[in-house]
Image (spheres, rainbow, N blue to C red):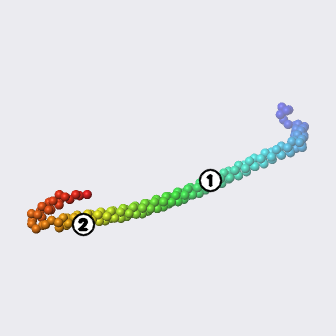
Amino acid sequence: MDLVTPHIGLIFWMTLSFLIVLFILGKFAWKPIMKALKEREDSIDGALHAAEKAKEEMSQLIFNNEQLMKEAKEERDAMLRDARKIRDNVIGEAKATAEEEGKRIVQTAKENIHFEKMAALTDLKNQIATLSIEIAEKIMKEDLSTNEKQKTLVTKLLNEIHFN
């Protein structure tokens, strides 16, 4: 039990050896250990700071990407609206041009029909006039004093007429 109960000598030597170990550690080991701990603490703080900065940059990049996407969608929508307007204008102009061309063609056709009709009527009038003159000549050549002669002449003339 002597070893378990502390005596003054044991306490003195234990304290002396503790102080020597403490002095040696303080002289040679304490500064490098503290320096290493400080460097480790600084590197951890730097890494945490860098991670926080990277996180902020990522959130900023995400925000910028969202803004760019929003602007791109708005620009795309504007381009689509402009394209639709241009398409509608082109279609409208094409319809108007087609309608004008159709009206012009119809008008030309009506004029041509009118001219052909007038030419046909003129030709018909000329033929009727020619036939009338021929009939009048033949009537003048014949003596038409009796009804019998008139009927015979009309029948004869009708048989002689040749239609073109």
**Residue 85 image position (x, y, % from top left):** 50, 60
Disc marking residue 82: none
**Above or below: residue 84 compared with residue 23:** below
Residue 143 location, quadrant? bottom left
**Residue 150 image position (x, y, % from top left):** 12, 64
Q: Which mark sits nearer the N-terminus, 1 or 2?
A: 1
Name the residue beneath numbered marker 1. 65
Cα–Cα gap, marks 1 and 2: 94 Å
Please report the residue visible at 19 percent of the width from the left and 58 percent of the height from the top: 160
Name the residue beneath numbered marker 2. 129
Q: Is residue 5 left or right of residue 160?
A: right
Q: In this view, does 98 lie to the left or right of 123?
A: right
Which kind of residue does numbered mark 1 sit on?
Asn
Which kind of residue does numbered mark 2 sit on?
Ala
**Residue 95 image position (x, y, % from top left):** 43, 60
**Residue 155 image position (x, y, % from top left):** 14, 60
Please report the residue visible at 74 percent of the width from the left and 47 percent of the height from the top: 47
Label 1 sits on a secondary structure element that is helix
Please report the residue visible at 22 percent of the width from the left and 57 percent of the height from the top: 162
